[in-house]
Image: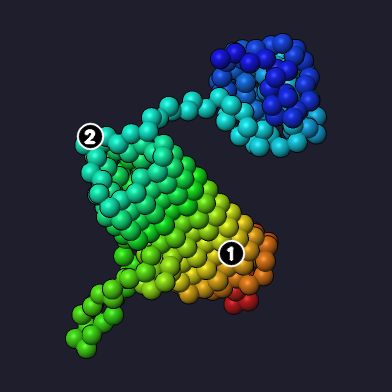
Amino acid sequence: MKVNARLIAGLVHGTLEGDPEIAITAPCGIESAKPEHISFMGNLKYEHYLYSTEAGIVLIPSDFQLKEPVKPTLIRVPDVYQAVALLLQHFQVKEQVSSSIAESAVVDKSASIGEGTHISAQVFVDRNAVIGKHVHIYPQVYIGAEVTIADYTIIYPGVRIYRDCHIGEYCIIHSNTVIGSDGFGFVKDEDGAFNKVPQIGKVRIGDRVEIGANCTIDRATMGETVIHDGVKLDNLIHIAHNVHIGKHTAMAAQVGVAGSTKIGESCLIGGQVGFAGHIEIADQTEIQAQSGIGASITEKGKKWFGSPAIDYVSYIKSHIIFKKLPELWKKVLSLEKERD
């Protein structure tokens, strides 16, 4: 598919600088792009590529000032990454799926399957499951009893959804994720042995949630584990029992959230962050990667870093001092020798 610069500028609501008729066939990274490609420069770390790239078209920020002439046609946009998202939607190859149930799929007679839904090979759908319209379920997915999956959701291969869980509409769940596994609930008896606490709750996932590969979301001990609308979870994330994650919060890979913790709306959580149980995190909190959160965060919109975490600015100041400790220690030893 060939698209010229004039059409792309209209698509991303950008301002054109250069040849409006130059045509491209696909997006590509700026460092390896060829004349038939469109690329982007949204981070100044990659500015040097702009002056050497062979790309036919490059998206750049509206206020970016060139330091030297460039070969590509430029399209200036207010937000490069939003423009790239629009562009990739245009070039995305969408799989054509027919409404059908594969012969090797096992669907209980009591299950309800909506119009336009495709169920692939070796899928198992248990009793009284309700699957909405235009859902796409890839091979080897397990859907337990009483599960509901709303319209236009995509379930990739190997996903396991245990009994009595609810998945909203327009969700995407990637391969090998497990939803509704038992929470980690045990109590010790008088002999010190662990006895299992039955986990009789459920998981409720809102609309337009995306969950990466190999995540686990535990069912509640009682009540619900809740992932609210618009949440985005990266790969390898663990959400424990009775956790609530607020609308439009995003978590990078390997985050772990212990039981009964409540995370607010529009939070940004870096990779490998660990949350203690039974705490609350305010809306719009930002937490840097590998931080440890052991207590509630009550002030909205603050940034945190470290383990145990402190506010971001304090952490950076402390780190500057920490790096100087060996030098300071030598000075202390030298002063002690002089004193002696």
Q: Residue at x 56, y 15 (%)?
A: 1
Q: Earlier in the sequence, mark 1 or mark 2?
A: 2
Q: Residue at x 46, y 67 (%)?
A: 243
Looking at the rendered structure, the secondary structure element under dot 2 is loop
Q: CA distance from mark 1 to mark 2?
A: 44 Å
Would you call the spot at circle 1 few (<14 residues within 10 Å), some (14-19), or many (20 or more)? Answer: many
Where does label 1 land, which residue?
264
Q: Is residue 306 in view from this perspective?
A: no
Q: Position of residue 237 (x, y in %)?
A: 42, 54
Name the kind of residue labelled 2 in the image: Glu
Tell whether label 2 touches label 1 (CB within 8 Å): no
The picture quadrant where one finds residue 258 is: bottom left
* Left or right position of 332 against 146: right
Q: Is residue 68 above or below residue 303?
A: above
Q: Position of residue 324 (x, y in %)?
A: 61, 60
Name the kind of residue labelled 1 in the image: Gly
Q: Residue at x 57, y 30 (%)?
A: 89
Nearer to the camera, 329 or 176: 176
Nearer to the camera, 92 or 51: 92
Q: Is residue 85 above or below residue 268?
A: above
* Left or right position of 31 against 194: right
Residue 103: numbered disc:
2
Nearer to the camera, 279 or 272: 279
Q: Is residue 79 in view from this perspective?
A: yes
Q: Residue at x 52, y 62 (%)?
A: 245
Q: Position of residue 29 (x, y in %)?
A: 57, 25
The picture quadrant where one finds residue 256 is: bottom left
Q: Position of residue 184 (x, y in %)?
A: 33, 69
